[in-house]
C-alpha cells in the first residue's frame, strides 16, 4: 500500500512533539503557535489524529499526571515518528521549491 499523505493537522501535531512530551491542551497550544494561529485544533480532531498517529506508531504515551484534579495524558514523538516527520518536512520543502521556481520566487526568502 502506498504511504498516505500526511494531513496538516498530523504534521503540526508531530512537530509540536519534537522538543518535549505534551498533553492534549499543550499540543493544541503549541500547534497554534507553530502555525501562527492559522491552525486551530478542536479537541475531537486532536484526539482522532493522535489515535491514528499512535496506531501508526508515530507517537507514544509518555506519562499521566494529575493537575488541578484532572488527569492529563502526555504523548511523545516515537523514533518512527521522527523519521516520518523528517521525510514529510523534506517532501514539503521540495514541493515548495518547485512552486517557488514556477512562480519566479526562488530568490525570495520567506515567500
Image: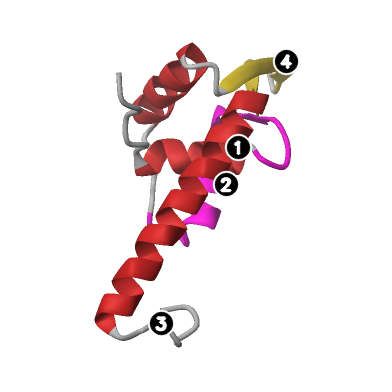
Q: Are marks 4 and 1 in contact (CB under 8 Å)?
A: no
Q: Nearer the viewer, mark 3 or mark 2?
A: 3
> Where is 97 relative to 7, above or below?
below
The disc at residue 30 is: 2
> Dot 2, crowdedness within 10 Å: few (<14), some or many (≥20)?
some
The answer to which of marks 2 and 4 sits earlier in the sequence is 2
Which residue, given by chain and number where applicable, does mark 1 sit on?
26
Q: Secondary structure at mark 4?
A: strand
Residue drawn 47% across the image and 78% down it: 110
Disc 1 element = helix
Q: Quadrant of the N terminus?
A: top left
**Total marks placed:** 4
Q: Which residue is mark 4?
A: 63
Q: Are circles 2 and 1 on residues that touch, CB within 8 Å? A: yes
Q: Residue at x 62, y 34 (%)?
A: 82
What's the CA distance linking mark 4 and mark 1? 14 Å
Q: Judging from the image, what secondary structure is the residue with disc 2 in?
A: helix
User: Going from the N terminus, do you reach mark 1 or mark 3 first?
Assistant: 1
Query: Upstream in the sequence, badge 3 or badge 2?
Result: 2
Say which residue label 3 marks. Answer: 106
Amino acid at each position: 500500500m502506498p504511504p498516505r499523505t500526511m494531513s496538516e493537522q498530523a504534521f503540526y501535531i508531530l512537530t509540536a512533539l519534537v522538543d518535549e512530551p505534551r498533553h492534549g491542551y499543550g499540543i493544541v497550544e503549541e500547534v497554534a503557535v507553530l502555525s501562527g494561529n492559522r491552525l486551530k485544533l478542536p479537541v475531537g480532531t486532536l484526539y482522532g489524529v493522535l489515535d491514528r498517529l499512535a496506531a501508526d506508531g508515530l507517537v507514544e504515551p509518555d506519562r499521566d499526571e494529575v493537575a488541578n484534579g484532572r488527569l492529563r495524558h502526555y504523548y511523545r514523538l516515537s523514533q518512527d515518528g521522527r523519521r516520518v516527520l523528517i521525510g514529510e518536512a523534506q517532501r514539503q520543502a521540495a514541493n515548495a521549491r518547485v512552486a517557488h521556481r514556477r512562480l519566479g520566487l526562488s530568490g525570495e526568502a520567506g515567500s
